[in-house]
């Protein structure tokens, strides 16, 4: 588990991180999102001390990493790997040498290095590319090399700084599927900084939203997306186009919802006419979740009937532009 307690980081007059309090569960895939300059990459890089904080505490499995120096810091950093947007591969070295580098620097035997490199190359699907150089590989293949290299020292935490931003959608999906498989197979914690909302929806268990160095929201990915979340709306630049007349009620359908016929059943049971004016279905990992907005006549009686019905059925809802 990674815990940030009142973490602050400042560059001259700019507050990059302002009193961050956040807990990232072990063995999860956690997303950090926000606009450019929000502090996402800075927060990520404090975990392996590529960025030193000015105040506060960062605990990794109960250890205050600010107290680590010399050998203890080097040992800790071996457990925290990182992959980047542009792969950071050595262009003059073969794929084998790129993957083997951390092992060679750590003094492993050649036979052990060979075994590990071949194992990881097979895992990420580039075993036939070991004698190639990065210039001969596609972007997706280069990112697979970077992932294999990151796993050489058996890390417990994998930091991903915009790791899919330079890839096309199909390749991005393949890399995310690989990361999910790696997380499950190696039981590691993956922390992703990204501006790609589809990446967040596909793999992240929870997300934290940063704005101007402050943590403005944290929660389960599906719950934040299907709710009427202002912070996410600012990032996605999405808004519902709804009628200005009548009463608009937004109804949420989380994965626990099993009543797919709710709307037609409610109309029949209450004998109330209404219009469906907005709706959206989204894919979150293995679940399809959604929300829709219905519009009813602007009468208090109809409003109260619908609200009581939704409450009885234990359905999540919001009154858009009116009192609940």
Image (cartoon, helix red, strand yellow):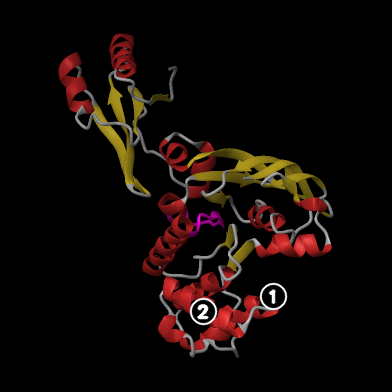
Q: Is residue 308 left or right of residue 138?
A: left
Residue 215 badge:
none
Residue 8 picture location, percent across and down: 77, 46
Which residue does the image show at 66% across and 81% down from the upper left?
104
Which residue does the image show at 80% across and 64% down from the upper left?
71
The residue furthest top is: 301
Quarter of the image for the N terminus: give it.
top right
Viewer can see residue 123: yes
Residue 198 picture location, percent across and down: 42, 54
Q: Is residue 10 left or right of residue 247?
A: right
Q: Is residue 140 left or right of residue 55?
A: left
Circle 1 residues within 10 Å: few <14, some 14–19, many ≥20: few
Residue nearest the observer in this picture, 250 or 48: 48
Residue nearest the observer in this picture, 191 or 71: 71
* Secondary structure state at the residue bearing disc 2: helix
Q: Quadrant of residue 280?
A: top left
Residue 115 badge:
2
Asked if residue 125 is among those painted magenta in the image, a careful observer would answer no
* Secondary structure state at the residue bearing disc 1: loop
Residue nearest the observer in this picture, 9 or 112: 112
Asked if residue 194 is among those painted magenta in the image, a careful observer would answer yes
* Start-end of magenta stretch: 186-198
Quarter of the image for the C terminus: give it.
top left
**Residue marked by disc 1:** 106
Which residue does the image show at 76% across and 52% down from the upper left?
65
Q: Gap between marks 1 and 2, in whole Å?
A: 15 Å
Please report whichever mark, 1 or 2, sits nearer to the chain's N-terminal start: 1
Viewer can see residue 139: no
Location of residue 11 with respect to 120 vertically, above or below: above
Location of residue 233 with respect to 141 vertically, above or below: above
Residue 248 picture location, percent across and down: 35, 26
Residue nearest the observer in this picture, 89 or 155: 155
């Amino acid at each position: 588990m990674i815990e940030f307690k009142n973490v602050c980081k400042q560059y001259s007059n700019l507050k990059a991180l302002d009193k961050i309090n956040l807990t990232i569960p072990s063995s999860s895939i956690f997303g950090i999102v926000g606009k450019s300059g929000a502090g996402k990459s800075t927060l990520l890089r404090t975990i392996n001390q590529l960025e030193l904080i000015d105040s506060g505490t960062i605990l990794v499995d109960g250890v205050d990493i600010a107290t680590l120096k010399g050998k203890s810091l080097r040992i800790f950093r071996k457990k925290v790997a990182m992959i980047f947007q542009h792969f950071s591969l050595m262009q003059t070295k073969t794929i084998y040498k790129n993957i083997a580098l951390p092992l060679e620097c750590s003094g492993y035997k050649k036979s052990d290095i060979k075994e590990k490199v071949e194992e990881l190359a097979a895992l990420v699907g580039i075993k036939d590319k070991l004698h190639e150089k990065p210039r001969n590989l596609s972007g997706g293949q280069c990112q697979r090399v970077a992932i294999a290299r990151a796993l050489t020292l058996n890390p417990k935490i994998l930091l991903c700084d915009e790791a899919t931003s330079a890839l096309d959608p199909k390749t991005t999906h393949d890399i995310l599927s690989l990361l999910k498989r790696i997380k499950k197979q190696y039981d590691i914690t993956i922390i992703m900084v990204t501006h790609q909302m589809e990446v967040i929806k596909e793999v992240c268990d929870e997300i934290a939203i940063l704005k101007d160095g402050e943590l403005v929201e944290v929660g389960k990915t599906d719950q934040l997306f299907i709710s009427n979340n202002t912070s996410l709306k600012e990032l996605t630049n999405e808004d519902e186009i709804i009628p200005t007349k009548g009463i608009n009620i937004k109804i949420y359908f989380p994965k626990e919802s099993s009543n797919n016929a709710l709307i037609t059943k409610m109309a029949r049971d209450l004998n109330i006419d209404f219009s469906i004016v907005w709706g959206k279905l989204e894919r979150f990992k293995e679940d399809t979740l959604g929300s829709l907005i219905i519009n009813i006549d602007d009468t208090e009686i109809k409003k109260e009937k619908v609200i009581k019905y939704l409450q009885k059925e234990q359905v999540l809802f919001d009154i858009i532009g009116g009192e609940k």
